[in-house]
Image (spheres, grey):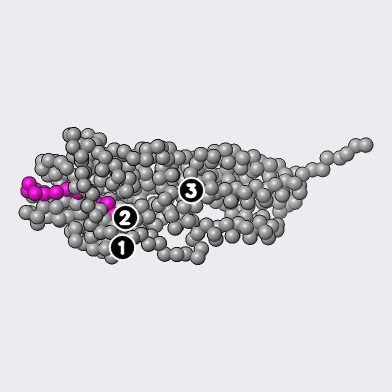
């Protein structure tokens, strides 16, 4: 997925894409033309963690070698972050010369693979026209959705439209949840993994039956048959780079565990305030973003049972030294933790949040025991 940070660049891309689409309208592809799905490897930036998908049209007879890329957006869009959080950020397609495209990924040290589609010339022509019409008409603009609408799903949709049926469907890992499928992509990016674990709700716990990631599409294409023949019989590696992950002294599980261990060791009233306030504020944020955002992945977030807004009320009574309510709210939050633990038993993110569960339970049990009303002994 590409980020364009200049409005002049955006204008130029729009102009070139429109010009190329207009110029290509009347081109009739030769019998030697090829159409391919391009799969780009993962990068270390947040926008490139999942790789990228594009379509290549090549016809030496007509001097055509273009890549259609549905992963462009304008980073200078007004209110970019609120729009992204809301789920109404507009993405769009651009077309670029293959050499420019491949040079960009060479510069980024990201692998690129190509799978030629085994379809007749008339369907290659139809796909070529559909791509150009999409650019010229503005149909290539879409509202980005993490699972349901992205650079991969747009490629799948336009190829299936050309083939006249849902030929390209997911063939692998359909027994895994979306959350489980995503997890390996966050290796060496610990806090990104933790963040997505706690902000995503039950939608990502569903079985991953939709094609939404480039490498998933690449694997499925190898297995798909079209008119009794393999749709993409060969996978050609154009660029190959070994994945490299720059080390980080803080973005790892050790800093996470050490931080929580220090909180437990210090174990003072100020620490309790800080910890419970932070957890409660995050819980309020999860509730707000779940209602505010159109990203269904953020809705109905059961992680608020851990990041419980009721912890903020507990902090209030903790400050006023109201023992009765401290005890009641401690027990309430412990009960919520128990429910949360039951929900997480078969979830992919159980172990990454388990240290937070243990820390919360430890502090809450302490408060409950200290503020439990003594039972008088009658002799």
* In the image, residue 31 lies in the stretch drawn in magenta: yes
In this rendered view, identify the residue nearer to me: 228 or 185: 228
In space, the residues marked 3 and 1 are separated at their CA atoms by 28 Å
Position of residue 103 relative to residue 284, above or below, is below
Which residue does the numbered mark 2 point to in the structure image? Answer: 41
Q: Seen in the image, is 67 located left or right of residue 349?
A: left
Residue sitting at 57 percent across and 41 percent down?
Answer: 340
Which residue does the numbered mark 3 point to in the structure image? Answer: 197
For marks 3 and 2, the one nearer the N-term is: 2
Q: Which image quarter: residue 343?
A: top right
Mark 3 Cα shell of 10 Å, populated few (<14), some (14-19), many (≥20) = many
Which element type, helix, strand or loop, lies under badge 1? loop
Task: Please identify, in this view, whether the residue under mark 3 or under mark 2 is nearer the observer.
Answer: 2
For marks 1 and 2, the one nearer the N-term is: 2
Position of residue 132 relative to residue 203, above or below, is below
In space, the residues marked 3 and 2 are separated at their CA atoms by 23 Å
Which residue does the numbered mark 1 point to in the structure image? Answer: 109
Marks 3,1: beta carbons within 8 A: no
Query: Which quadrant holds the N terminus?
Result: bottom left
Q: Position of residue 239 (x, y in %)?
A: 25, 59
Residue sitting at 26 percent across and 56 percent down?
Answer: 112
Which element type, helix, strand or loop, lies under badge 3? helix
Which element type, helix, strand or loop, lies under badge 2? loop
Which span is picked out in magenta? 29-40
Q: Seen in the image, is 248 located left or right of residue 260?
A: left
Q: Which image quarter: residue 15?
A: bottom left
Report whether residue 7 is seen. Answer: no
Q: Seen in the image, is 315 located left or right of residue 224?
A: right
Q: Position of residue 200 (x, y in %)?
A: 46, 45
Marks 1,2: beta carbons within 8 A: no
């Amino acid at each position: 997925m590409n980020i364009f940070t200049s409005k002049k660049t955006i204008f130029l891309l729009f102009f070139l894409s429109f010009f190329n689409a207009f110029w290509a309208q009347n081109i009739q592809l030769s019998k030697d033309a090829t159409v391919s799905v391009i799969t780009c490897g993962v990068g270390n930036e947040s926008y490139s963690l999942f790789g990228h998908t594009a379509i290549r049209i090549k016809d030496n007879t007509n001097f055509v070698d273009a890549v259609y890329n549905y992963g462009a957006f304008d980073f200078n869009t007004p209110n970019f972050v609120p729009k992204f959080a809301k789920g109404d950020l507009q993405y769009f397609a651009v077309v670029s010369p293959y050499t420019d495209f491949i040079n960009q990924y060479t510069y980024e040290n990201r692998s690129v693979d190509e799978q030629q589609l085994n379809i007749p010339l008339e369907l290659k022509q139809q796909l070529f026209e559909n791509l150009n019409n999409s650019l010229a008409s503005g149909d290539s603009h879409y509202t980005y959705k993490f699972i349901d609408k992205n650079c991969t799903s747009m490629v799948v949709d336009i190829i299936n439209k050309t083939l006249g049926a849902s030929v390209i469907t997911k063939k692998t890992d359909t027994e895994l949840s979306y959350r489980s499928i995503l997890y390996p992509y966050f290796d060496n990016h610990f806090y990104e993994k933790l963040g997505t674990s706690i902000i995503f709700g039950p939608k990502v716990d569903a079985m991953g039956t939709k094609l939404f990631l480039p490498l998933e599409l690449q694997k499925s294409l190898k297995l798909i048959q079209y008119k009794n023949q393999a749709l993409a019989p060969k996978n050609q590696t154009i660029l190959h780079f070994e994945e490299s992950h720059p080390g980080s002294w803080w973005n790892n599980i050790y800093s996470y565990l050490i931080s929580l261990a220090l909180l437990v060791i210090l174990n003072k009233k100020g620490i309790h305030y800080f910890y419970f306030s932070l957890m409660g504020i995050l819980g309020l944020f999860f509730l707000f973003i779940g209602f505010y955002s159109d990203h269904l992945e953020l809705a109905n977030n059961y992680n608020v049972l851990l990041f419980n807004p009721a912890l903020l009320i507990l902090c209030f009574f903790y400050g006023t030294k109201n023992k009765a309510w401290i005890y009641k709210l401690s027990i309430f939050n412990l009960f919520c933790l128990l429910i949360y633990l039951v929900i997480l038993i078969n979830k992919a993110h159980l172990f990454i949040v388990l240290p937070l569960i243990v820390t919360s339970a430890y502090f809450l049990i302490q408060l409950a025991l200290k503020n439990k009303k003594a039972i008088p002994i009658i002799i």
